Amino acid sequence: MSVIIGIKAKGAVYDTQSAEELGLEGEPIYFDNSEDSLAIMRHTCAHLMAEAIKSLYPEAQFFVGPVVEEGFYYDFRIAKKIGEEDLAAIESKMKEIAKKGEKVVKYHLKREEAIVKFQNDDLKQAVISRIPLGDGTLSIYSQGDFEDLCRGPHLPTLKLLNAFKLTKIAGAYLGGDEKAEMLTRIYGIAFADKESLNTYLRQLEEAKKRDHRKVGMEMELFTFDEEIGAGLPIWLPKGARLRRNLENLLTQALIERGYEPVRGPEILKSAVWKTSGHYANYGENMYFTTIDEVEYGIKPMNCVGHIKVYQSALRSYRELPLRFYEYGVVHRHEKSGVLHGLLRVREFTQDDAHIFCRPSQIASEVKNIIDFTQKIMNAFDFTYEMEISTRPEKSIGSDAVWEEATEALKSALNECGIAYKIDEGGGAFYGPKIDIKITDAIGRKWQCGTVQIDMNLPERFDLAYTDENNTAQQPVMIHRAILGSFERFVAILTEHFGGEFPFFVAPTQVIIIPINEAQNAYARELRNMLLKVGVYAEIEDKNETLNKRIRNAEKQRVPMIAVLGAKEMEERKVAVRNRRTKEQSEISFDDFIQLNKEKMREVSF
């Protein structure tokens, strides 16, 4: 049996030292690749890395070293500039230290004692200042010659660590404050065994090949320009076509499901953001400006605009549910350090919708959204899971309203037979939500869509409808985005398929290659007919060899290549190369058009 490295009690994870000092009993955590075990070993591995850095660079000072989704990191200050080439030496020192099997020891100091102990270390003073004053006693974990302020949990000994890897080095602002000092940050990963580590590293290499920033540049989908600003993507023609294909599929599905298109302004007076609660609870993520001495906020969400659509007329129970959708452009203030290609930007477009319904209609509406979601996920061969996020600390509304809304989401998922996890405190400030997390082709999980039940904004804006008894009632508002945003979804889609997009959304579906100038007119006829049936085609007629033009077409990851020679033109045929199946065939002009029409209809949401 594996070594016990901690226990789980009352939903929290404790290492063996903490459990013993607190007299806790609970579910044992073994040294394996379970989520709780990985958290303990990766936290310890962060401290192992810090000890190695301190050994190699004695002047190094350390800030924080948490566990994160991609493993762990440590932020530290160092006089010497270090880079990727230095990671191997740090990693080698880590292995050397781990083999010694140093024990990890926990002890406590009073806050005042800790301040004195670290009086010559301003980074440690910064850490202490961030610890709530109620914590009069601070814990310290020590191993060999290294120790640090830390709440844990940690392994009992470093000897257990034998499958780890340092993955990258970056800069990080102290405490995430862009105005503060830039520290050095090193990321790493750890597993219970080398086989799992090697599997992860192979996945990491595959991820680098599929990186949407690299593939997007190669395919000319999008770009960024420092003259315009960080986090503000520019969509190039091919990327815009990809988005348009997604929008067209979504629009048809939305219309069939009874959604109505609406559009709200992108800038609204701050007074409405104060009414909604965004000003107090989300203001740090918004951009504001002043017009005619009145403050306005650029919208970070589309919900207030849709509320105003609802308020534009008196509403009856006979109209409900009302479903409004908008491909709404929103802006959010993201720190420069977290911007990441299309995955994290400052301007993006949500596939947003808001449903206004009666409480009795919540379950059926959520079930319809889940059905819609499943069709979209299946169309792209995504596996996915769902998670209910509950009330966060910073929120609005009564406990009773939150409880009712949370139970409505649980009930809907239970009725659909969908297993789900609970993310305590992860809800929006105005209501609980279902988060849709998809798993891509190489096993990574991504947060995309969301379904949120909101009984607070209808109350704040005094929304009403007239019921069967001619009495005013308050509707429920359901916030819903399935892709999340077109930017994020395109990034995920690009990495999932490595740029090999399915035919029905590919930015260029067919490249036509006339063998020589004599077939140019025939190529234009074929392209024009494809465009008429909604298939985007390009003609590759550069003054280059046929083989080179075919290679260029393949590099563009286009699904289908049509080669036209004298024989094809004379017989009104098309020589077809299916890039994905690697199959070649020859079919008639009309059959080729019909084939493309059918491929465009292969998927519907």
Image (cartoon, rainbow, N blue to C red):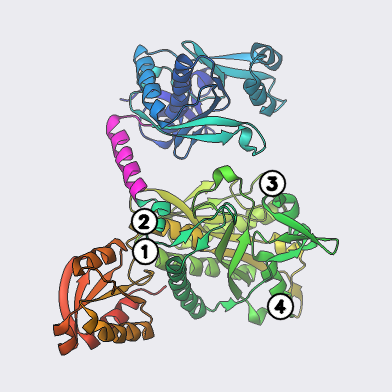
In the displayed structure, 293 sits above or below 206; it is below
Residue at the far left: name it: 567
Membership of 334 in magenta stretch: no
Question: Which residue position is annotated with label 4?
Answer: 467
Q: Of helix, strand and loop, which one carries label 2?
A: helix
Question: What predominant SS class does the magenta segment belong to?
Answer: helix
Q: Residue at x 35, y 51 (%)?
A: 210
Q: Helix or strand or loop: what does disc 1 sit on?
A: loop
Q: Are marks 4 and 2 in contact (CB under 8 Å)?
A: no
The amino acid at mark 4 is: Asp
From mark 4 to mark 2, how far is it between C-alphas?
Answer: 47 Å
User: Marks 2 and 3, how far apart in space?
Assistant: 35 Å
The answer to which of marks 4 and 2 sits earlier in the sequence is: 4
In the rendered image, residue 154, in percent from the top left (x then y), is placed at: 47, 23
Q: Residues within 10 Å of mark 3 (few under 14, many from 20)?
A: few
Q: Nearer the viewer, mark 2 or mark 3?
A: 2
